[in-house]
Amino acid sequence: MQAPPDLSRRRLLGGGLTLVGAAATGCAIPVGLGSSRTRIRYWHFLGASDGIVMKQMVEGFAKDSPDLFVEENVLQWGEPYYTKIAMAGAGGRSPDLAAFHLARLAGIGAGRILDPINVRLLEESGLRAADFSPPIWERAHLDGVLYAIPFDAHPMVQYYNTEICGRAGLLGPDGKLLPTNGPDELVAALRKAKDAMGGEAPLTYDALGLGTVGPWRVWWSLYSQSGGTLVSDDATRITIDDAKALEALRFMSMLGREGLCDTRSDYGASVARFTNGQVAFLWNGDWEITGLKERGTPFNMTRFPSVFGTGAAQADCHSFVLPHQRDRDPEIERATYRFIAYLIKNSADWAVAGHVPAYLPALELPEYLALQPQSEYRSVITDVALDPQVWFAGSASRLWIEFGDAFAPVIGGTRTPEEGLATAKAALGRLLSAPIPFPDQEG
């Protein structure tokens, strides 16, 4: 499967292996050459600013736990990563720990490719269910069994240019964007920004391009705000509410038709336009913070607008899973939970890259609250609109790409909302009828 272009930031290191030991330099002594430390094999896909922060956290753990040794393997983001996890887990010869997108859980063969989380060891490490965002914790289960430990949410957010919004009269006395509630207030704010920009479209997101996923992410945010669902709980029937789905699509179409939204930008162009001060608003995931700060863009961030009832925003979540092993070593397993607990309890450090910790105590720490603009949208952690639990959902998935392809022409005005919804539902029907592509048993 082709990964959508908005994810190129995560293509890093292409499978480079980093060994992190207890030495202050971060250099490692290979296990087996006189070392008595317990080795934890850790796979992840985190690149760019995410990868830098994760490496620092792994090094911090190494300093705190000189008896343990983390072997950090950074693999290519997207479909290749999940293929490797599936192959390793199906064979029972896998790493001790892996990073994972929570929306991928239903499609990876939990119980065959992933092992359940040992709740007793998790609690011994100081982590309890009550410490996590309830909807995210619930999504980490399949058939009542815990298969993932949530790390964060990376939701759709609203970036805004403080200089343009200031000229448009959209900022409050504190210099922050005045909130809008409902479609009329949002449209009024966009029109003020358009006037302040001399008639240019004030909003951008990735609405165009091969494999674009922006249309899915915006539509799923809006549709979820009205309580809409996609499929039945048993993933056998389409449950889309046409009226609610069309309400969201017509709103997206109207923004393009009235010149309130740029309809001609792919992912890279949308970020570049906001970075260069050519638009007032960018709807995107929370991960562009580092680049915008480095380039000196005058910006701040807030939650995705509340348009159709609630403040729900499309999101996926990073989590930790245990790829299947035939014989999991008890000593390594206990060490693995120590490592997980360290990462979770220090997730305020992880939030530097923009993501919202799923571990609720981290959201109250002074060091997290001091992060700007990261802490501005933290309340979304209990309002995330997660993907349905189907095998074809999640980041870089067929669901995102199929719906993006169906809805992009609606935004651009070359397809009606009704036609876009019909195209999306036909694609969803094909995906529901397709066989689940993971092994039935160990190989």
Image (cartoon, helix red, strand yellow):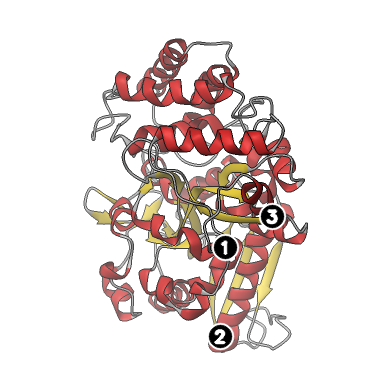
Q: What number is the disc on residue 37?
A: 2
Residue reaching furthest to the left: 144
The reply to whether callout 1 and callout 3 are in contact (CB within 8 Å) is no
Q: What element carries label 1?
A: loop
- In the picture, residue 203 is in which quadrant? top right
Q: Where is residue 194 shown, x and y percent of the image? A: 63, 34
For disc 3, the neighbor class at 10 Å (few under 14, some 14 to 19, many from 20) is some
Image height check: is 429 above or below 304? above
Q: Which label is found at residue 373?
A: 1
Residue that label 3 marks? 15
Q: Which of marks 2 and 3 is nearer the N terminus?
A: 3
Which is more N-terminal, label 3 or label 1? 3
**Residue beneath the point at 40% across and 55% down:** 380
Q: In this view, does 140 lie above or below 82?
A: below
Of residue 415 and residue 186, the one placed in the foreground of this image is 186
Q: Which of marks 1 and 2 is in front?
A: 1
The first of marks 1 and 2 along the sequence is 2
Neighbourhood count class around disc 1 (C-alpha, 10 Å): few under 14, some 14–19, many 20 upward: some
- Measured in 3D between alpha carbons, the distance from the residue under mark 1 to the one under mark 3, in whole angstroms, is 32 Å
In this picture, residue 2 sits left or right of residue 341: right
Q: What residue type is labelled 1?
A: Pro
Q: What residue type is labelled 2?
A: Arg
Image position of 106 with respect to 70: above or below: above
Cβ–Cβ below 8 Å for labels 1 and 2?
A: no
Query: Between marks 2 and 3, how big is the CA–CA gap?
Result: 24 Å
Where residue 171 appears, as percent x and y from the top left, is 55, 53
Q: What element carries label 2?
A: loop
